[in-house]
Image (tube, helix red, strand yellow):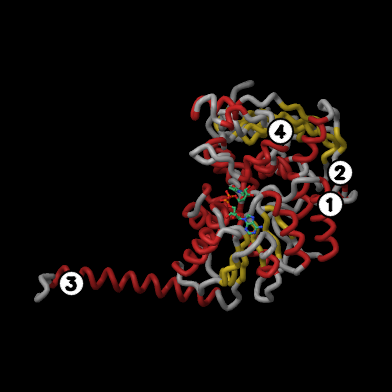
């Protein structure tokens, strides 16, 4: 051929292009089909997490993003670009001051709002979104204070609009298999859980790689508490039937001194760096103990500023045995083959795999965070589409978040027990489990 491409190469390339176009057409067709009843999502806070959530939702059919908002123009532009790149209409971009998000919320062409901003904006934005009648998906934690917890519940009850904290670890495949095991009675009556958020975030989240404080680090100067309890507590809530048969009763917490942040800066930037000498209110390890009204206990660790690999250290223990996530093992009286010897968990994972995962395995595995984000978001969007309840409700959202002010109050009082507020107004005693019920 004239341009030097021979016939076989030409046919090969044409076939490749044709296949590519067919794939694009199929995708477009799938999108248009699903777009007959699209879910229209507005996103507030399009930083790392906001864009990651958008990326996951862009892999799903029938999701449109008419509007995005961020106080940082670059973040908003990047979010708009990923929508366009996916072949969807360009979103309207809201960039302005910290309250500009209200203009996005006021639009009448949005079904749901996703909030992935700094922590102090989560509750105010969620309250505004519910008041505007939009399904609300708010990143973790949903609230920082007792007052914010109450505001979220009050607004939900007044407006009847669902509000779900996007606690993705509740949707982990292993945690849901354990939930199935518990519901089928394998561990007997539930007695105790341990959980932790052990994630060294000093060099990338609380501070940037140059040692400048980021917005998350500001909280370490001001508060001494479990700053980030919801990843630990997410699966525990359903394992122990919290808010549907049992409830948090009181909490007592202790914090170590704060050593890790100064030590990190001395090591990495030298003893004269301002952050090596600064006083941080936040202790390195916070250990909280919640006792429930039905006499169970939960130990929760905050552990985010000492060098260490990631860990959640989940253990759930009942009258017949226990599951231990770190060991990837179980021991079940009358079932495990050897007396007092751990048994490998993976066969249980296969046997008790949750229906959600069986149904969405391929799509979820192709997405990030081990597929949990895909599962979480697709269930949130299903609720929006069907105008039904969200898989995590406002009561569970604030109960998980309430450990922040509970631990802060207990630490401030020398580890005194602090009563836990009942956000369900007594309904916990009669409510039936709803999360992940087939
Ligand atoms: N569930 C998870 O696994 C997970 C993982 C990472 C982060 N998060 C949560 O996501 C949230 C965002 O974290 P990130 O790492 O993306 O932080 P980030 O700093 O990358 O992004 C936050 C964005 O919010 C924007 N913002 C702040 N205030 C705003 C306002 N008033 N109006 C509009 N935009 C505003 C910022 O400009 C920024 O772009 C945090 O609350 C964090 O806890 C959750």
Residue 189 lies in what quarter of the image?
top right
Image quarter of the C terminus: bottom right
Expressed as whole percent of the image width and height from the top left, the position of residue 232 reads 67, 39
Disc nearest the viewer among 1 and 3: 1
Disc nearest the viewer among 3 and 4: 4
Closer to the chain start, of discs 3 and 4, is: 3
Residue 337 lies in what quarter of the image?
top right
Query: Which of these two is toward me, 105 or 64?
Result: 105
Residue at the image point whose x is 13% and y is 70% from the top: 5
Image marks 4 and 1: residues in contact by CB distance under 8 Å: no
Disc nearest the viewer among 4 and 1: 1
The crowding category of the residue bearing disc 3, from other C-alpha atoms within 10 Å (few below 14, some 14 to 19, many at least 20), is: few
Expressed as whole percent of the image width and height from the top left, the position of residue 25 reads 40, 75
Disc nearest the viewer among 3 and 2: 2
The crowding category of the residue bearing disc 2, from other C-alpha atoms within 10 Å (few below 14, some 14 to 19, many at least 20), is: some
Q: Is residue 310 above or below residue 39?
A: above
Residue at disc 2, CB closer than 8 Å to ligand 1: no
Q: CA distance from mark 1 to mark 3?
A: 66 Å
Callout 3: helix, strand or loop? helix
Expressed as whole percent of the image width and height from the top left, the position of residue 201 reads 57, 37
Q: CA distance from mark 4 to mark 2?
A: 18 Å
Which residue is label 3 attached to?
10
Which residue is label 1 attached to?
150
Q: Is residue 16 left or right of residue 79?
A: left
Q: Is residue 318 visible?
A: no
Q: Which mark is residue 421?
A: 2
Image marks 3 and 4: residues in contact by CB distance under 8 Å: no
Which residue is label 4 attached to?
300
Expressed as whole percent of the image width and height from the top left, the position of residue 419 reads 87, 37
């Amino acid at each position: 051929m004239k341009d030097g491409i021979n016939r076989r190469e030409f046919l090969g390339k044409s076939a490749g292009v044709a296949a590519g176009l067919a794939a694009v057409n199929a995708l477009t067709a799938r999108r248009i089909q699903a777009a007959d009843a699209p879910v229209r999502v507005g996103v507030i806070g399009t930083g790392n997490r906001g864009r990651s959530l958008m990326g996951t939702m862009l892999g799903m059919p029938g999701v449109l993003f008419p509007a995005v908002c961020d106080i940082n123009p670059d973040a908003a532009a990047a979010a708009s670009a990923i929508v366009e790149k996916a072949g969807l209409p360009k979103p309207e971009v809201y960039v302005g001051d910290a309250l500009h998000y209200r203009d996005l919320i006021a639009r009448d062409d949005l079904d749901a709002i996703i909030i992935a901003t700094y922590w102090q904006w989560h509750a105010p934005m969620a309250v505004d979104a519910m008041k505007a009648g939009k399904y609300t998906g708010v990143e973790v934690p949903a609230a920082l204070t007792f007052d914010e917890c109450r505001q979220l519940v009050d607004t939900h009850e007044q407006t009847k609009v669902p509000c779900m904290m996007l606690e993705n670890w509740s949707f982990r495949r292993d945690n849901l298999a354990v939930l199935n095991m518990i519901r089928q009675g394998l561990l007997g009556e539930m007695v105790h859980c341990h959980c932790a958020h052990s994630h060294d975030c000093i060099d990338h989240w609380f501070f940037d790689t140059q040692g400048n404080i980021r917005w998350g680090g500001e909280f370490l100067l001001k508060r001494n508490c479990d700053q980030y309890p919801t990843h630990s507590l997410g699966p525990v809530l359903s394992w122990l039937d919290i808010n549907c048969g049992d409830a948090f009763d009181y909490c007592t917490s202790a914090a170590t001194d704060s050593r890790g942040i100064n030590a990190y800066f001395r090591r990495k930037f030298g003893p004269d760096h301002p952050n090596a000498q600064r006083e941080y209110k936040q202790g390195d390890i916070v250990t909280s103990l919640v006792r429930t009204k039905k006499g169970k206990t939960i130990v929760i660790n905050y552990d985010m500023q000492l060098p260490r690999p990631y860990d959640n250290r989940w253990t759930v223990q009942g009258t017949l045995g226990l599951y231990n996530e770190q060991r990837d093992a179980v021991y079940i009286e009358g079932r495990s083959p050897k007396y007092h010897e751990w048994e490998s968990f993976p066969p249980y994972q296969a046997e008790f795999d949750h229906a959600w995962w069986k149904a969405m395995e391929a799509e979820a595995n192709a997405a990030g965070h081990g597929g949990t984000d895909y599962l979480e978001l697709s269930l949130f969007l299903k609720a929006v589409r069907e105008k039904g309840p969200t898989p995590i409700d406002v009561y569970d959202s604030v109960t998980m978040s309430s450990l922040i002010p509970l631990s802060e109050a207990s630490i401030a009082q020398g580890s005194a027990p602090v009563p836990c507020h009942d956000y369900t107004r007594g309904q916990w005693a009669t409510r039936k489990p709803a999360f992940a019920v087939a």
